[in-house]
Amino acid sequence: MRDFSQAPFLVIWEVTQACDLACVHCRASAEPRRHPLELTTEEGFRLLDEVREFGDPLVVFTGGDPLKRPDLFELLKYSVDLGLRTTVTPSATPLLTAEAIERFRDCGVSRMAVSVDGPDAATHDDFRRVPGSFDRTMFALEHARRIGLETQVNTTVTRLNRDTLPRIANLVAASGARLWSVFFLVATGRALRTDDLDADAYEEVFAYLYELSKTAPFDIKTTEAQHYRRYVAQQRKREGGGAGSPKAPAGPIQRQAGINDGKGFVFISHTGEIYPSGFLPVSGGNVRQDSLVEVYRTSPLFVALRNPDRLRGKCRICEYRNLCGGSRSRAYALTGDWLAEDPKCAYEPRDRHVALVNS
């Protein structure tokens, strides 16, 4: 098993904050123009060289819209040539042409991820605040399938689209996407607390995703809903599929076991800030003057986030704390304390003594 104190499983690089969409829940509060202090091409090469020192983490080129960078394909090719598993998350704008999708494939990108936040143009484009985004997304998924480029669909769950999840799932299945990544809202950037679900509604969405995962032709993972792993472990215990202990269940959930903000996960901003997550914009350093590897391994911020004994509230005593640990980003967004308990978790841990014995 990978030692998350030494290397992340996932490295996210926000290559630009620029984007021609105006999504209502955008973490980055993206705007059309590129920031003048973005990492340069050469700085990007050096960053990717450092990422390679971790071994073989999965590298995600994100934004904003990565296609706003004219050197994107040069950077993608460099990443692939280093032997890094490389994916890209473009925005569905006029920049996402058939030629661009074919260039992703030709660069050796392993997967393209696009966002679908509604089952139709009216719902999706209302999220994006730009008409035509839904149709461009459907085109991108179909063209990628036609040319043999693997795809992933990202969906952010809010109170506005929660009831449409089954219809979105049907679109994911029809698209041939390999993975449905379901994001749970974190109130940062343009995202509003009032659009988030309450803790009980999280559990209801978990129940839907768990049942769907048994038959869906695609894998399902959650982002900023670490407690979905706890839910899955509990359900498999009830169904007689395992001990239901705080160990990772089998399948896609197992690959996420223990990963959390700053633990198996690191985010580099467009200006080089090293964050535990894009949803947790607290910097441990900057790649322009600090070693990414050393910041990840030794900075007090990252070390604290990886230590379950530093957690507070019920997350600290929970028997699932090593499997889950709660969303550190959501704790920070809602309480100002990244070590606080996850305010959107409905689960009440067992007796403190039992919890610590099993953690």
Image: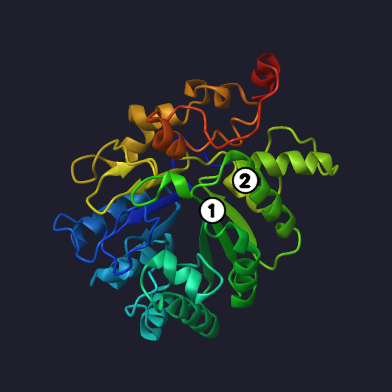
Q: Tell me, for residue 73, which label it has, or none.
A: none
In the displayed structure, 91 sits above or below 295; it is below
Residue at point 46%, 80% (across, down): 135
Q: Secondary structure at mark 2?
A: helix
Per the rendering, the mark at residue 159 is: 1
Q: Which residue is label 2 attached to?
A: 201
Where is residue 181 shown, x and y percent of the image? 55, 58
**Relative to the observer, which residue lies in front, 359 or 331?**
331
Q: Residue at 70% of width from left, 22% of height from top?
A: 350
SS for callout 1: loop
Q: Is residue 248 visible?
A: no
| Residue 232 percent across, percent down from the top left | 70, 44
- In contact (CB < 8 Å): disc 1 and disc 2: yes
The residue carrying pointer 1 sits among few (fewer than 14), some (14 to 19) or many (20 or more) residues within 10 Å by Cα, namely few
Residue 83 in picture, x, y percent from top left: 42, 61
Residue 279 vertical placement versus 118 (above, below): above
